[in-house]
Amino acid sequence: MAGAPARVDVRKTYKLFIGGAFPRSESGRSYPVTDAEDGFLANAALASRKDARDAVVSARKAFGGWSGATAYNRGQVVYRVAELLEGRRGQFVDEVARSEGLSAAAAEALVEVAVDRLVWYAGWADKVAQVVGGTNPVAGPYFDFSLPEPTGVVAIVAPQRSSLLGLLSVLAPVIVTGNTCVLLASEPRPLPAVTLSEVLATSDVPAGVVNVLTGRVQEVAGWLASHMDVNAIDLTGVTDADLARDLEVAAADNLKRVRRAPLDGEPDWTDAPGLDRLTWALETKTVWHPIGV
Amino acid sequence: MTTVLTPTAGVDEATRSASSLRQFLHGLPGVDQVGAEERAATLSTRSIKTTAKAYAIDLAIAMIDLTTLEGADTHGKVRALCAKAQRPDPADPSCPSVAAVCVYPDMVPVARAALDGGAVKVASVATAFPSGRAALDIKLADTRDAVEAGADEIDMVIDRGAFLSGHYQQVFDEIVAVQQACSGAHLKVILETGELATYDNVRRASWLAMLAGADVIKTSTGKISPAATLPVTMVMLEAVRDFRDSTGRQVGVKAAGGIRTAKDAIRHLVLVNETAGADWLDPERFRIGASSLLNDLLMQRTKLVTGRYSGPDYFTLD
Amino acid sequence: MPFDYAPAPESRAIVDLDSSYGLFIGGEFVESEGGRTFKSVSPATEEVLAEVTEASADDVDRAVKAARRAFTETWAPMPGAERAKYLFRIARMVQERSRELAVLESLDNGKPIRESRDVDVPQAAANFFYYAGWADKLGHAGYGNDPQPLGVAGQVIPWNFPLLMLAWKIAPALAGGNTVVLKPAETTSLTALAFADICRQAELPAGVVNILTGAGETGRALVEHPDVDKVAFTGSTEVGKAIARGIAGSRKSVTLELGGKAANVVFDDAPLDQAVEGIVNGIFFNQGHVCCAGSRLLVQESVYDEVLSRLKRRMATLRVGDPLDKNTDVGAINSAEQLAKIRELSAVGESEGAQRWAPSCQLPERGYWFPPTVFTGVSQAHRIAREEIFGPVLSVLTFRTPAEAVEKANNTPYGLSAGVWTEKGSRILWMADRLRAGVVWANTFNRFDPASPFGGYKESGYGREGGRHGLAAYLRRSDR
């Protein structure tokens, strides 16, 4: 009857995901996360600049190993993430439905697209080079070839509204080619990102390849945009145009590759992606070698 | 065994002058890294079971240079190590003793006293081990000190700085000088392959040491990583094989550092068997520098005998 | 004291062999209509492993109909992303059942368990993994933004890499949206039949993959069936030519992977120990039953003595014997028929004046065995320099200059592969430029990867398998 439930449930603590582990914010802060009707869901960690700093360090540390792995291996790892996400679909359906105020059926449809999106990107790992690389017929006795390489540590401001599908759509293409990343989850809807981190932690993704921060875009994005050891920044989730411009200015200090926020708001993430998200964080290296006896 | 010709100038010509030495070393066939590592990896899939495993374990034990090279070494520590060296398995007298104990020069008298009369040899590091960064006369004094204290074998380090800057003659001359200072003690020459960085350099350094008179070429000091990886040991085994084919002299190999499990040790023995050949399957010709390896070998040995997996409580820590 | 490796047998217990097998048509195992059965034998022991059905012309018709129905009703309309997920499932299952498949392959084919375990099965899984990823990206493959499948593919594969050749055929075909009827070689049906079971476990829609066991007649019926849109064949040049003639004037497209007589060219500045490994791997891997085998060693005269003495010393460490022993390097010859051919051509080599050498090996009494063998003093005019032996027999020729090496390497109707050993980068590229071969291996040999296109020039066939290029055979381009 009224008063207390028959069985008290054990509620999850939502922490950051850095270097393969789940620390609280070093600042000790958190912020309340609410559902679509402003009901309390949980307290999420409120990341500080030091958390951002630590995340970049761990992403850098992981870069050598991840970019040095074979493309086949990376594809297998990302496929494994899809396997585990599929296995936990019930949990994600609940989490997305609550976070985004969707019906179970609508949330389920999104989760299914999210899993399939991961599978799509997993299959790209060992094909990108064949599509965007190749030999160049220079006018001389030289073998000349161009190949794509990951740029390094990529900071990503995840979409604010699509808490799982949108997040995976900006994350997967960046890491499948060998980049590592620091991802700032949606500020109002961070919880699926943290639960996703649990999947990443148990699916052979090496520690540090993906680091997930939860907190204020205004606060954290600036530190990532000005960090001199971050190679590229995706501003997709920055909805404030002035902030987006300031971040781009800060990024220019070490000429980060910048992906600007979409002009006309958050896209429909269920649309089939093209190649742009796969290639924007890649460098092209061209090598020459003489041909002769 | 057919004699294999060396590719460039004859071996006798090589040591005639600094420039001929350089030409000889640079004229050795290169080592393709990927191919070498693949070959070593394929050999490490050999399945060594039952009687073959028993043979390999006992041989590996007999090839160990049981080592302690720590700043914190004391007389007590060295004596305990020597006792272990002579009787590795207190529960089983049929277990072979190791080949040698390896210590710093100032611990040689302690080891000598503890091992006197037995088959286990006393090996000492020398020449400002592990870095080798000291004047030559200091390195020679270090060597003589160890020899006078009773060392049967000397493990010297080459000057890697000189090698990497191409001063091969200097490295050569130092080895010759140290060998003289050994006054008959066996000389092992440590290449410190982790610092040489390429297999081409490992091959060149191996030949350099052998031309200078090394009795044994040794992979590493064990103080840095990588140390005795399978491909590095393989390249050195190829070098001693080719050296014997060219000159008739058989030089030994010691793999030291990073060999922690019986499985690692057995893989090295497979390499010896299939690269240099059965003539090197002898503690006089192949050694393994290790410390914790011995207990793993003993555990595996015990499992073969009893059929059960053992645990660390049943073997001594010294 | 010698280090004798004790027997290290891989257990057969993991394989669950039926005494007889039917045909896999329309998603289930069925009895033949009018066909006979034949025995599948272990080439290492001559024991009978199972009875296998020889598919009749009626069976072929049934299978093609099942494939057509599946194509029209299920597979072609299915979105690429869904097809991809079936292929990923199959890839995973091949990985899960890898030990069983490796043991089965070694039992049936005679190749060492180390090779089936470390090469054949992992590569087969990798091929499904790779092509799974193309199924939903065909518009990015360079064949127009909406290429279409061809329809029903009739595929005939050889006995040298049974499961791997199956993967090379089926994976790209299915990724492209086609359905298949595949005939494994008559001496090596068992892993194909296990694969059929994997298709069932993966719940692949019925009729997408059909497996018909049988020999030459079955293959011919399949290739000539009027409702097959695409023919893919790997096997001898002789049969390849017959197929090309047979489909002339029809609407069928065809790709052929045929024989070879590859030159493995070793220069005086080669990394010697690795070159020797490359020579050994080139001709003794898989008992030399490799279309792209480095069966002609072209060694620069100035290093001839050195290379030969190292080669012979290395050959003496090859362990020939029980394929299921984990330490075996060289297994059994696949059939009595093939053994007879190898013996015949070796005898020809001797009678032509070449010098024959093999290390002494203890060969088992039962089964089909041939020791790793090298012929020196071979010239281009010798039959053993021109004809594919398809066994562990190496012919050694010499050359003086790079141009001469190229000339001799190209002086053959074949053009599947070639090897180049030198530390000089420019020369590698110069040689690669001039060698008329579909695959050039520099400072390595017999390396395969699902991402890397493979196929021949000249009479080694046409079409490529592997990589983005491997899709071309199974698509109707939308950019004409």
Image (tube, coloured by chain):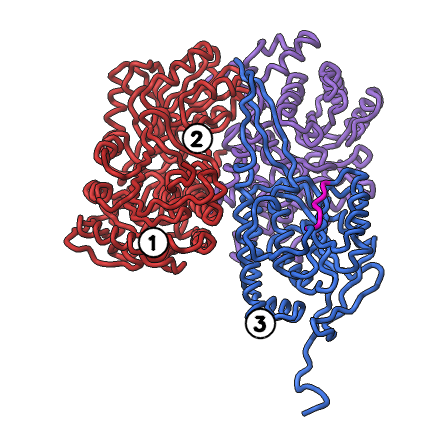
On the rendered image, what quadrant is the C terminus of chain C found in? top left
Looking at the rendered structure, which numbered label has been put on residue C281?
2
The colour one sees for chain C in the rendered image is red
The colour one sees for chain B in the rendered image is purple
A242 left or right of A70? right
Q: Name the spot of residue C394 as percent of width and height, x first.
A: 36, 24
Q: Which of marks 2 and 1 is in front?
A: 1
Instruction: Report the residue marked by disc 3.
Output: A104
Element on which disc 1 rests: loop
- In the displayed structure, C430 sits above or below C220; it is above
Q: Name the spot of residue C311 as percent of width and height, x first.
A: 44, 23
Tell which of C231 and C72 is nearer to you.
Answer: C72
Element on which disc 3 rests: helix
Q: Which amino acid does label 2 sit on?
A: Asn
Q: The blue chain is which one?
A: A
- Can residue C117 be seen at all in this image of the molecule? no
